[in-house]
């Protein structure tokens, strides 16, 4: 092994200063001249610069990346990843598929392949020696890191799913339409590949710089390097990983199936069993939260890792602190909106993303839109306008506030950084050590991405002209021209982005009034392209960290975006998915939200005009610009007020989290905060050595173990394939009502 590549010998930052690393990974700070903070000789990882220098090894062994084996395994596991993605689309808490889950599958199958299939050496010196190249093509030998990464990223890219699949689910559930195969394939290609083309052109800003961390990558990168870099420290980390993975795999069976009360243990709910019905209703709204749209889950403790996830072990503390402010506001505002009867909230469930009639029943939208999915004005006068719950209206309002605040924050606070990043990329002087290490590989030229954009555009045009979209052909131009890269920039730096779909739905409602299905597809080719591009940019960053040649990454991601499926949950659990509340296992909140937005914004003039009940929602887009502008002016005069750096207050994040509990299962919030505090305040600050070596490994192991078990349970007992096998009722799994015993609002009826 080349000495300069060994993670246990030395590493150098972009300024040329050298850190000597001992066998246990500790740094000799006497030889370091930089701005990092050290505790007991270990660097405290705070910034993206710290991540690049201390958390991720710059080593590159130059092994093969693109092989028949990596493509084959990636393709096989892509189907599974896409299936798991669709399962989580219909869960009460929206989670992403853990890359660790797919990483382990590819690692195991890759090693089995390398071990048991014939190698070239078997025929060397024999009469079958001519078969050597073929055998080597099939089994090149040792399953290396880069092969492993390529196979995993193909599967992971497919596991992001596709916004088009969500649209097809909405059409099947709400419009009784089975989308044709040609429409499905071309729409999926158009959405995914347009997003990737956009990502490729924005690489200098959203991938290359050190501050573009994509914090959720770190557990996966850490595991890749631990599995493939041979050292005593990594041996300990691999052993630790497997123990944590197996422990969580076994444990997850308990809260997910046997003892679901553990998903939301609330002292307040248990204490309210003999309270008056009015008190029980209030307690359910405020403290309940284990079932979909049950309540806000204040101070509930969740012990179910599938819903907690490792993201709070990786997100920077600045991001988490902003989210805490948003959470606090959310509890106060949603309760105030409901009990003050704002937007007639008391007539509907407190939490739901469905749309309702004014008598409180679910809105009969099929009576208002004809067989061509166009508005029937006469029927609308008879049935009346749809209504939003107060929480859903607030969620829409805060999304627009967030978009306005995001645009202002990126331009005012990060504008100079963006200009410098493009200049550095153009001159190839970006100081990040991982970027510099990649300069020896040929870059994927920009025109490859332009061609991808053009192909995606024409695929979308064919879908509009031939598919069941009700979009006029000229809408595609406006759709694909409305992508908002600002959210990608925020996600890369802070680990969470801002949903831009409200803006796109507003435009769609103006361009195609009275056409909800047209609104669906318009949003798909605008906001959802950005949603896809964030995941693809995240993978590009992983490729930079792990030294995958850019041209290989291009092929890997284009192939992965085409491997998307929709599983049978839509058919098997149709009634629950249409139910405004759902259950603690399945929920249609995602499809309900997409459909509600499509229907209401297709009635933009009636609902969101100045004479409509929700006129403040579109206006909040402009209002969101103002506070951030004022904050920037304050920052110019007073960069620091007391202990707070003014620019670390990120208002669009606060707006977003101030409606975080508007739908879904909310019993996990307190546990998520605790996990973040333990990891980012205690471990990172006081035990940086353990944090650097084990924090990301632990998070990835827990995610992988939980998601493997959930995949098994979904098909074995949760009914994803049609047959549900519930666990017998007992105190920890009550047969009737909500599992946390907050049974107000008719939960026992």
Image (cartoon, rainbow, N blue to C red):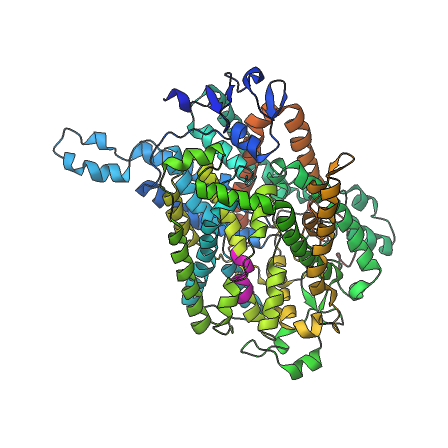
Q: In the rendered image, is residue 712 in sight?
A: no
Provide residue 174's location: percent of width, then percent of height.
58, 68
**Residue 98 place in picture, x, y as percent:** 53, 42
**Which SS type dominates the magenta stretch?**
helix
In the image, residue 528 lies in the stretch drawn in magenta: yes
Of residues 577 and 6, the one drawn nearer to the viewer in this rendering: 6
Q: Position of residue 139 (x, y in %)?
A: 28, 37
Picture quadrant of residue 128:
top left
Q: Residue furthest left?
A: 127
Q: Is residue 574 above or below residue 211?
A: below
449, above or below 684, in the image: below
Q: Which residues are magenta?
A: 521-529
Q: Pick whichever, 645 or 490, lies toward us.
A: 645
Question: For this view, does 627 lie left or right of residue 73?
Answer: right
Q: Quadrant of residue 394?
A: bottom right
Find residue 133 and report its horizontal and vertical position in percent: 21, 38
4 is within the stretch colored magenta: no
Name which residue lies at 72% across and 49% down. 289
Outermost right residue:
276
x 59%, y 45%: residue:
416
Would you say residue 617 is visible in this rendering?
Answer: yes
Quadrant containing the C terminus in the rendered view: bottom right
Q: Residue at x 59, y 51 (%)?
A: 487
Q: Is the residue 506 above or below the residue 159 in the image? A: below
Tell how many labels.
0
Residue situated in front as seen by the camera: 532 or 585: 532
In the rendered structure, the answer to whether residue 731 lies left or right of residue 281 reads left
Left or right of 674? Residue 136 is: left
């Amino acid at each position: 092994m080349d000495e300069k590549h060994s993670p246990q010998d030395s590493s150098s930052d972009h300024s040329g200063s050298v850190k000597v690393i001992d066998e246990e990974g500790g740094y000799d700070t006497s030889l370091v001249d930089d701005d990092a903070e050290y505790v007991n000789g270990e660097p405290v990882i705070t910034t993206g610069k710290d991540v690049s220098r201390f958390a991720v090894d710059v080593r590159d062994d130059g092994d093969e990346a693109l092989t028949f084996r990596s493509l084959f395994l990636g393709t096989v596991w892509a189907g599974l990843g896409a299936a798991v993605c669709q399962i989580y689309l219909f869960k009460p808490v929206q989670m992403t598929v853990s890359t660790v889950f797919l990483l382990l599958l590819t690692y195991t199958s890759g090693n089995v392949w390398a071990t048991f299939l014939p190698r070239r050496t078997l025929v060397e010196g024999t009469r079958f020696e001519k078969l050597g190249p073929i055998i080597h093509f099939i089994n090149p030998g040792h399953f290396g890191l880069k092969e492993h990464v390529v196979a995993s990223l193909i599967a992971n890219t497919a596991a992001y799913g596709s916004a088009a699949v969500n649209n097809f689910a909405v059409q099947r559930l709400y419009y009784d339409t089975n989308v044709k195969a040609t429409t499905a394939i071309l729409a999926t290609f158009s959405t995914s590949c347009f997003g990737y083309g956009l990502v490729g052109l924005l690489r200098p800003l959203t991938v290359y710089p050190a501050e573009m961390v994509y914090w959720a990558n770190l557990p996966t990168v850490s595991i890749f390097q631990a599995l493939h870099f041979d050292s005593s420290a990594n041996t300990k980390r691999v052993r630790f990983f497997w123990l944590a993975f197996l422990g969580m795999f076994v444990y997850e069976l308990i809260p997910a199936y046997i003892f679901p009360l553990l998903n939301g243990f609330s002292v307040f709910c248990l204490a309210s069993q003999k309270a008056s019905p009015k008190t029980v209703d209030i307690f359910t709204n405020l403290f309940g939260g284990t079932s979909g749209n049950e309540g806000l889950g204040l101070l509930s403790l969740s012990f179910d890792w599938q819903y907690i996830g490792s993201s709070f072990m990786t997100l920077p503390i600045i991001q988490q602190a902003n989210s805490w402010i948003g959470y606090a506001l959310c509890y106060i505002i949603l309760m105030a909106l409901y009990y003050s009867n704002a937007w007639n909230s008391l007539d509907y469930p407190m939490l739901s993303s469905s749309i309702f009639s004014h008598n409180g029943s679910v809105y009969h939208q099929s009576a208002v839109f004809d067989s061509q999915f166009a508005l029937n004005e006469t029927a609308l006068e008879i049935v009346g306008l749809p209504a939003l719950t107060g929480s859903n209206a607030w969620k829409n309002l805060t999304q627009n506030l967030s978009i306005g605040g995001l645009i202002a924050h990126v331009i005012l606070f990060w504008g100079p950084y963006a200009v410098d990043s493009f200049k550095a990329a153009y001159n190839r002087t970006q100081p990040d050590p991982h970027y510099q290490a990649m300069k020896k590989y040929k870059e994927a030229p920009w025109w490859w991405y332009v061609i991808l954009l053009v192909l995606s555009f024409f695929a979308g045009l064919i879908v509009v002209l031939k598919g069941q979209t009700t979009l006029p052909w000229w809408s595609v131009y406006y759709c694909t021209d409305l992508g908002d890269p600002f959210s990608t920039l925020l996600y890369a730096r802070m680990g969470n982005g801002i949903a831009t779909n409200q803006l796109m739905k507003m435009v769609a409602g103006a361009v195609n009034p009275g056409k909800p299905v047209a609104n669906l597809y318009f949003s798909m080719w605008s906001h959802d392209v950005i949603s896809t591009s964030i995941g693809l940019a995240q993978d590009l960053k992983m490729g930079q960290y792990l030294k995958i040649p850019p041209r290989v990454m291009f092929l890997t991601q284009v192939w992965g975006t085409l491997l998307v499926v929709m599983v049978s949950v839509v058919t098997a659990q149709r009634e629950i998915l249409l139910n405004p509340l759902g259950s603690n296992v399945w929920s249609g909140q995602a499809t309900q939200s997409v459909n509600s937005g499509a229907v209401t914004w297709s009635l933009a003039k009636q609902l969101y005009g100045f004479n409509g009940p929700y006129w403040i929602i579109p206006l909040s887009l402009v209002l969101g610009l103002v506070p951030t502008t004022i904050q920037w002016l304050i920052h110019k005069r007073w960069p620091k007020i007391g202990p707070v750096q003014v620019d670390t207050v990120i208002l669009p994040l606060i707006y977003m989290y101030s409606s975080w509990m508007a739908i879904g299962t909310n019993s996990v919030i307190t546990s998520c905060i605790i996990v973040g505090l333990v990891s980012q305040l205690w471990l990172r600050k006081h035990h940086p050595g353990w944090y650097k070596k084990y924090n990301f490994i632990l998070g990835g192991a827990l995610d992988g173990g939980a998601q493997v078990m959930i995949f098994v349970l979904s098909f074995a007992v949760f009914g994803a394939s049609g047959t549900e096998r519930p666990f017998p009722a007992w105190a920890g799994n009550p047969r009737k009502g909500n599992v946390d015993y907050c049974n107000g609002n008719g939960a026992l009826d």
